[in-house]
Amino acid sequence: MRLIVNPSAGGGRAGRCAPAVVSALEGHGLMVRREDTRDLPHARELALEAARAGETPVTLGGDGLAGAAADALRGVPDAVLGVLPGGRGNDLARVLGIGQDPVAACATIAGGEARALDLGVVGELTFVGIASCGFDSVANRIANEAPSWLGNLVYAYGALRALLAWRPATFELVLDGEPLTFTGYTVGACNSKAYGGGMYAAPDALLDDGLLDVLYLERMSKLRFLTAILPKVFKGTHVHDPRVHVLRGRELQISADRPFTVYADGDPIGELPLRVGVMPHAVRVLVPANSPLGAEQAREPAPSGDANTGASAPASAASGEP
């Protein structure tokens, strides 16, 4: 195993627990070589170098590190990636059923099975989780600048701070050739269910179905967002609100009436306007044996309308509660 560690992830959590992780992996009978990353490009280099040397790259850090390694390994024959939670959010480990304890998760590295997962695509870059913009752009920037002692509460902190100065934006989307305009908060192209440290933004999204779940939130009052949306996103029940919509498709174009940075896996990935796609079964990742990722429930894209209601998608949703 090549243990690729971001020592500063999780406010230094990954660096502190790395020796215990090495001991746990060796206790499972594995040969381990640790390497610390300088930045995400360096992480990509280490992952690719490990795979070409016949080693299994295992990341110990956050979703950004796992996403960078996955990006490096796509298309590499026989490459398999291991993921250990060491960051603040660890949403990929959460969705895969790996858990939040990096030492306990070493059992998945030793005894898990390799499953082919999709990657989201923006230009030449890929992501494992959710690419989002709008309100999320502001919240992500604030979260990335927040003090490390907040832990995974940093994402809720970012959302609350962002809400104070937020004003609705008008977005133009084209999903598999079908246009849609709305005014509101956020657009998310979801390869996975969760982001932001356990926020289940797209609770029905699957990592291995070859599709994106496209989430968007129409205009609503800040009070309603704070009381009826934000608390429910941790259980995924916010999607039942009539101002929250989920569509499904393979390619999404996003533009807006003002500039936004698009964030994915906690890091900037592009600026609007841009196109988001999906790369089916692009990388193999170690998951717990019999992990129910949903491959047996692979779905076809909804030709129109909300994935959770079947209602027709509005040509324009620009009106709404002020």
Image (cartoon, grey):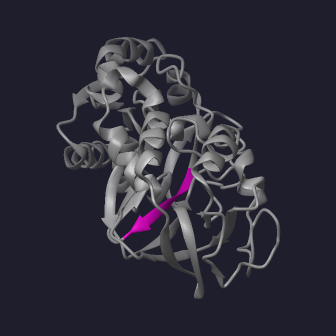
Res. 266 in view: no
Image x and y of residue 296, in percent: 77, 56
Residue at 65% over, 62% down: 209
Q: Magenta part mainly helix, strand or loop?
A: strand
Whether residue 114 sits left or right of residue 84 in the image: it is right
Is 235 placed above or below 206 here? above
Can residue 68 be seen?
yes
Residue 121 covered by magenta stretch: yes
> Which residue, as the protein is rendered here, is positioned at the far left?
38
In the visual, does 136 lie left or right of 219?
left
Query: Most extreme residue toward the right, as rendered?
Result: 310
The quarter in which the N terminus is drawn is: top left
Give residue 7's position: percent from left, percent from top: 26, 26
In the rendered structure, which segment of residues is drawn in magenta? Answer: 116-122
- Depth check: give the residue in front, 254 or 48: 254
Closest to the observer, 194 or 286: 194
Residue 56, how many percent across, how many down? 38, 38
- Pinpoint residue 18: horizontal percent, then vertical percent: 33, 18
Q: Is residue 157 left or right of residue 239?
A: left
Say if the magenta span includes residue 253: no
Which residue is at 50% across, 41% downward? 196
